[in-house]
Amino acid sequence: MFDSLLQTKLYQPPTRPDWVQRPRLLARLALNPQTRLVLISAPAGYGKTTLVTHWLRQLNDLPVCWLSLDEDDSDPQQFFRYLAAAIRPLPHSQTSLDQLLQTNQTIPAKTLLKALVNDLVPVPVPFLLILDDYHALDSAEVDGALAALLDLMPPQMTLALTSRSDPGFPISRLRARGQLIELRADDLRFTEAEAAQFLQQTMGLTLQPAQIAALENRTEGWIAGLQMAALSMQNRGGDLDGFVQSFTGSHRFIMDYLTDEVLAQVSPEVQAFLLQTAVLHRLHAHLCDAVLTNLQSPIPHLPAQQILEQLEATNTFLISLDDERRWYRYHHLFADLLRQKVPAATAQTVRQKAAVWCAENGLVEDAIEYAIGAAAWETAVPLLAQNGLKYLFQGKLNRLRRWYEAFPHDRLVQQPRLCLDYAWVLVNQGQKDTVEPYLQAAETAAHGAPDVRAITAIIRANNARAFEDLPVMQAEATLALELIPPDRAVARCTALAQLGVVQLMAADGDLAVAVELLAETAVLARQSQNMNTAFLAGGYLGLAHLLRGEVGGATAVWQETLTFATGQGLGQSPLLTYVHLGLAHLAFLAGDLAAARQEIAQVDAYCRFANEVSGLIRGQMLLALVEQAAGNVEGAALALADVAGTARPELAGTAVSLKNPDLPQQIAFLQAVVSQPNPSPAELETARLLAAGASLAYAQAVAQPEAAPPDQPLVDPLSERELEILALIAAGLKNKEIAEKLFISLNTVLYHNKNIYSKLGVSKRALAIAKARELGLV
C-alpha cells in the first residue's frame, strides 16, 4: 500500500564537499542524553537543510530517518504514512503503524502517534527522526501528535525539525528542562569569514575583503542573498564595486532584484528553461523535455539533462532528490520568484503537458495535481474517477478534498463518480451534514443509474444511522439491497448492518432479528475485508445481546471483535466506538466505575472525531448513570446536560440533530432518574438500557419485575421465563437447543436452570421434571 508514496521525500539530501564548514554551529548541535528536540528555525534561504545534512555526516553510524514535508502532509493520515515508511529501516522497529494505516478508515492523529511510539520502543540504538520544512504543515492534529510524541518517545530517539517558523506546539517546557537545542536566523547568518569562504570557495569568485564585507553587510549574512549575488557576479565584468552598491533593502526586494540579475547572466536557453520549468514540483530530464517540446518559444530548448547538470554544477538553487541524479527540485524560494515571472498561458501549457507525461509514466497524483492546476478538467476527471476510491482507502482525504474543491461546481456535479467519492470523503471527515447535495448531484448526472442509486442509498443509510434517523435507514438500506447485485458483498453487508441497527433501536423493532442481521453482517464483512462494517456490526451485535439480557453473549462478541481488530492492526479504529460503549456498560455492571469512565472517554473522542452523534449521546447517557452511582451529583448533571446539548459548546445541538423521535422522552426520563436521590432499581435499569440504544417502551417493559403466574404452590414462585424454560426441559430439549429456540445465550439458560432447581428444591434435571409435574407446573 506504500507504492503511492514519493520515495524522494524519504531521501536525505547529499552534502557538497565545497560547502562552507561551520564548526561553531555543529558544536551547538552536539546531542546529549537529555536532548529530545533539535529545532532549526529561520526564514527561507538561511541554509537550514544544508546545515543539517553536514551535521548528520559527522554523526557517523547514527541511524537517521529523513522526511521532507510539503503542504499535502498536513493530512494526518498521509503524514503518518510517510513516518511509517521513514522508520521502517530502523533495526527491530515494529509494524503496528503500518497495519493501522492499511485500511480505508480515518484514524485520529493521536491514535496513530501511539502506534508509532510502540513501533519505536524496541529499537535498540540511538536514532534521529528529521522532519524537514515543518512549516509546510498546517494541521493542529499533527501539531498535537508531535507534542505528545515529545512526551512519549523512547529515550533513544531525538526529533529534529527544520522550519521557517516555530512549530504549532509549545517548546518552552523543553527549553526549561534542557531538552531543546535551537538555532535561529541570527545563529545561521554567515559571519564575514564564512561569507568569504562561501563566495570564494563555493561560488568561485575572487573578491576583495572590502567587497566581501559590503556584501555580507548588505545581505546581513543571508545565505540565499549571497548566493544570488554571487550568481549575478560570475559572468560580470570588472565593475563589481558598482554592483555591490546597487542593491539594498528587504530580503524580498533583494531577491526580486537578484533573480533578474541571475536570469540576465545565463544563456537565453538556460533562462527559458528556468522560467518554463518553474511551475514543475519536481524536475526530471524526460519530464522537462516533454513539456518543452513544441512549446511556443522563440528560443529552441537544449536537452534537459544537459541544463540540469549545468545548473547543479553552478549552484543555481537546484537540489538533487536522489543518488542517481534523476530527480531534482528548485529551492522553494527561487521557484516562487521564478513563477512570478512566468506568463499565465505558458504556465497553463506546461502544466497540461506535465499532466499528460505524468499520467503516461504512472505518476497519477502528480498528473492530477498538474491537470487541476492547468484547469485541464478533461484530463483530471478520468484520472480522479479511476483513482479517487483508491486514494480514499489510502486515507488521503485532505488531498482529495482539495482536488474536488478546486473543480468548478458546475463541472463537479456533472460527474457521478466524483460526486460519490467526494461524498465519501466528507463522511470520513465527519462532515456528514454536507453530503446530501453531492448525492443528489450524482443521481441527477447518472440519470437514475441503479449502481449509482445503490451507493447513494448506502451513504444515506450510514449517515442516518449516525443521527438515528430510523425511517431513512430502513428505506435506504432496503433499497440498496434491492439494487446491489448478490456478488457485491462489501456493499451488501453495509446495508444489512443498517437494517440490524433499525431493529435494535426502533420501538417496534425485533431484537432477535437484529441479532440475526448483525451476526450475518459481521461474518460477511470479514469475508469481504470490509473492516469498517465488521467493527460496527460487532459493536451493535453486542448491544443487541445486552438488550436481550445476554451479558455473556455480549461480552464474547465485544472481546472477539476487539481481538480481531487488534490482530488486523486496527485496535485503535474509531469504528470500534460501539465496542467501547459496550465495554463501558460491562464495567458499569461490574461496579468498576473508573473503567467505565475510561471507556466512555474513548467513545467520546472517537464520536467527536467522526461526528458520530448517536454514540456520543448514548455514551453521555451512561456517564450520567456512572457519576450518579459514584455520588457525583454535579458530574451526573453535566453529563446529562451534554446529552441535551447544553453543556460543552462543541456538543451544542447534538440532541437536536438526532432524528430519533423517542429521544425527547428518553432525555426527560433520564433527567427524572438522575434528579432523584434514590431511584428504583427498575428506573435505573430502564436508564441503562436507554444508554445501550433501546427505545423507551422496550426499556421500561424489560426493566419491570416479572410478575409470577398465579397459583404456584411455591414459596418463591417461578417467573414467566423460568416456566417457559421448564416446559422446554420437560419436552426433552437440551440446554443449547433451549438457548437457540429462545434466542438467548447458553449462559443465560444455565443461570435460569440454577434458579429453577433452587426454587423446586432439586439438584438434577430429571428431579426438576418430576417435581414440576407433581406440582402441575408442566
Image: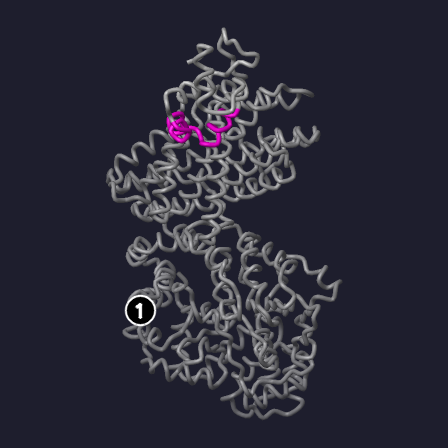
Name the residue at 36% across, 29% down: 474
Q: Circle 1 — which element?
A: loop
Residue nearer the viewer, 335 or 711: 711
Residue 399: x %, y % from top left: 43, 55
- Res. 72 visible in picture: no
- Res. 335 visible in picture: yes
Name the residue at 41% across, 27% down: 511
**Does 418 sit left or right of 613 as displayed?**
left
Residue 548: x %, y % from top left: 47, 27
Question: If the image is split into quadrants, where does the N terminus sit?
Answer: bottom left
Q: Which residue is mark 1?
A: 361
Q: Which residues are magenta?
A: 734-754
Residue 146: x %, y % from top left: 60, 58
771 is higher (above) or lower (below) than 139: above
Question: If the image is split into quadrants, where does the C terminus sit?
Answer: top left
Residue 362: x %, y % from top left: 32, 66
Residue nearer the viewer, 195 or 16: 16
Rendered image quadrant of residue 174:
bottom right
**Disc 1 marks which amino acid?**
Asn
The answer to if 751 sits in the magenta stretch is yes
Q: Magenta part mainly helix, strand or loop?
A: helix
Name the residue at 41% across, 68% down: 279
